Amino acid sequence: MSAAVSNDRKRGKKRYGGGHGNKRWKGSRELEVGMQGILITCNMNERKCTAEAFNLLNEYADQLYGPEKLQENNGSSSDGEAEEEDVDVALKKEVAQLKASGAKRERRFMALDSGANNVIFIKTQNLEADKLVHLILSDLHTTKKHKSRVILRMLPVTGTCKAFQEDMVKYLTTFLEPWFKTPNSGTYQIAFKARNSSHNKRDEIIKTIAGMVGMLNPKNKVDLTNPELTIVVEVIKAVCCLSVVKDYSLYRKYNVQEVVKEDTPKPDAETETNTPGEKDKKETNKEEKKDEKETNKEEKKDEKETNKEEKKDEEEKKKGEEDHDNNVPHDKKEDEGDRE
């Protein structure tokens, strides 16, 4: 009997998460509609990615907003004072302490489960995520300093809604106004990505959003090469994350690994830095190619003239043979007349 009870307990632990489970971010909150923050993609190592993200975000957030101020709980009193206090005063103090501890837990960055593998969501509090991410990428692009190993892309999320087309259309109608409604206008592209969601078709969503942008102001034009603005649409499960960002192409689709790489210079005659030997070699090659072209032209010209002469000789030869053939019967006739 006792063995059966023991087995039931073991099964209960496995079923209801007793011991070590395989669930990621156990006990953490998940990405929900109404949140703002930053989507960060990585390659396999989510824990290390989260640690790097906190370091990077706090470094640049300190530049924009100053160091984070944490509330300290110093409301404890000595035993003597506690005895003298009235019960109501003690209760009020305890409530105040609980509120202070609750406020302390609301940090400006909080890591949440995004709902997709290799993607973490950092919820932000009292700051502009798009401005912060742009500052990070701008500095990395200028300094070319590697400040992370596992972080791939950092995408700000300035708005969220349910990931159903009717909800997205309703939300985007007002969300896009600050950038695209008359008198505002600009060139744009739409970057759409869906994870763990199959009810939204990419082409249909892009076409719908483009139609909405055109209705806000006909001067808004699509530019897939170098747009002024990029509408980022990231769907994860039932949540649609949205933002409108600048310099999306310049900052390599907001990829922190790619943005620090040196730009490959385009060949330009005015900015070429060749050694004298290389320059002479290039000029020599140019002259050789020029001579080769002229030689080929002359050879072709001579070949044409030779062909013309050969053709002329053949025609004259042919004509002489035809004349000879025509003369032979005539001579025979004269011979026959003389014989008669």
Image (cartoon, grey):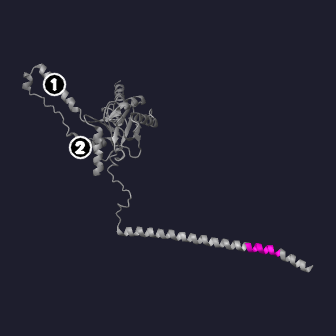
Residue identifier under label 2: 59
Instruction: State which tag comes first along the sequence, 2 or 1.
Output: 2
In the picture, measured across the screen, residue 339 lies left or right of residue 154, that is: right
Magenta residues (range): 319-328
Q: In the rendering, at what x and y percent does residue 313 appear? A: 68, 74
- At 52% from the left and 71% from the top, the residue drawn is 295
Kind of element beneath mark 2 = helix
Q: In the rendering, at what x and y percent does residue 280 appear? A: 39, 70
- At 8% from the left and 26% from the top, the residue drawn is 79
Marks counted in the figure total 2
Kind of element beneath mark 1 = helix
> Closer to the observer: label 2 or label 1?
2
Q: In the rendering, at what x and y percent does residue 244 appear? A: 34, 38
331 within the magenta span: no
In the picture, measured across the screen, residue 102 lies left or right of residue 267, that is: left
Image quadrant where residue 46 sits: top left
Label 1 sits on what residue type? Glu
Residue identifier under label 1: 94
The front one of 78 and 181 is 181
- At 86% from the left and 76% from the top, the residue drawn is 332
Separation (CA) of disc 2 from disc 1:
35 Å
